[in-house]
Image: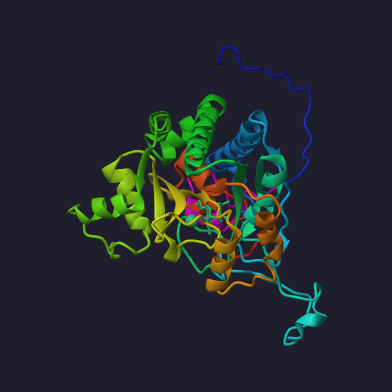
Amino acid sequence: NKPGVLEMQVSGRAIVGTSSAEDYPLQKKRRSLELLRTIAHLRSRTNALGAAFRVRHHLNFACHEFFHKRGFFHVASPILTAADCEGTGELFRVTTLEPGKQDLSQDFFGKEAFLAVSGQLNAEAYALSHSKVYTFGPTFRAENSNTSRHLSEFWMIEPEVAFANLNDNMDLAQSFLQHIFRYALEHCPEDLELFDKFIHPGVIKRLEEALVPFERITYTEAIKILNSSNKKFTFPHNWGDSLQSEHERYLCEEHFKKPCIVTDYPATFKAFYMRQNDDGKTVAAMDVLIPQVGEIIGGSQREERYDLLEKKIADGGLSTKTLQWYLDLRRFGSTPHSGFGVGFERLVQYVTGLENIRDVIPFPRTPGHVDF
Ligand code: 4AD
Ligand code: MG
């Protein structure tokens, strides 16, 4: 009875698959997202989770499109690795040894192996042959964080660009995010309307308003802002403290009220590969912070100087032997280069307004949960 809608004339019917009406977990009434998580194998049949799934698909495509159109090549970075890229030790070990057997020389690779926490180091190798590359794959972190923003298995997009400095990196990060926001507004209007109506009122306006230049401040400036605010934070925020989620969200949600990029963090809590600044204390790092989500992107200019990098690896207690191939990239024609990593699920969270990261990936893995 709606004009323009297809009408069918039915000439017959057959039952293909039956379902018991009483037991079917998705009755007509509304189910909480929390309850739907316990039936992850059925929840994509609901309006909200179906919409999240479709938006995820479109954003996935938009990522590849963004890089392809700008002359980037995709690198299939390995999932089985020997290196702990972020140096945080939150690794899933991969072994074929019987439980209780410890002799690593008898293990499958003859040494320790892990699931990759990042594809960055491998992407760097290809940036130094093809200038502009990116990875987009699953990454794994055994961090025991039961939050609405952490998964044990998540997808990360990691561009890496030769001859780019930190400013170029920030420009690329902003263009990338805004391309994704625009793409979603253009290609997923109906699903976004559903989110705007039932999940997160204002989510469409928020995407439209994020199409302006992001605020850019240094870590030192961020600390000053936190110290002069009247807000009571749980965690300390003196120079040298790492920024906690509450600090990050205050900066973008309350202070700037838009995405902001924080740069030049103290070297002490950042990864070994980040380029040391001339002050000797800070590194050319950047985090992009967005409302609701907090950190969506982490990146840096990379240390391209062999001696400094070798020292950072050793000082960080990492193995120069395991990372010799990475050091070689500085030995054979080094160049300044930069890159970053985008948490894909956090991106889908921001676009849909879904509060919990477990609702934007079909089958979430979190501490204690590897069902379905
Ligand atoms: O800041 P991170 O740890 O940076 C890296 O892994 C670098 N190697 C990236 C690079 O420079 N190529 O992680 C990057 C992003 C974070 O900003 C966050 O959005 C996401 O990955 N992320 C997670 N998303 C979901 N669950 C987790 N446990 C995540 N850990 C990081
Ligand atoms: Mg980070």
The verdict on residue 183 being magenta is: no
What's drawn in magenta, residue-wise?
Answer: 19-39
Relative to residue 18, is residue 70 depicted above or below? Answer: above
The residue shown at (39%, 40%) is 259
Query: Toward the viewer: 137 or 58?
Result: 137
Residue 221 in the figure: left or right of residue 22: left
Q: Residue furthest top?
A: 3
Query: Toward the viewer: 220 or 110?
Result: 220
How many numbered discs sit on the rendered protein? 0
Relative to residue 114, is residue 227 depicted above or below? Answer: above
The residue shown at (51%, 43%) is 165
The verdict on residue 35 being magenta is: yes
The residue shown at (79%, 27%) is 12
Residue 173 in the figure: left or right of residue 213: right
Residue 230 in the figure: left or right of residue 278: left
- What is the magenta segment's predominant secondary structure? loop
Q: Position of residue 133 (x, y in %)?
A: 67, 42
Quadrant of the drawing holding the C terminus: bottom right
Q: Position of residue 218 (x, y in %)?
A: 35, 48
Query: Does any portion of residue 22 appear in the rendered image?
Result: no
Q: Quadrant of residue 214?
A: top left
Relative to residue 342, is residue 94 depicted above or below? Answer: below
Q: Quadrant of residue 311?
A: bottom right
Quadrant of the drawing holding the N terminus: top right
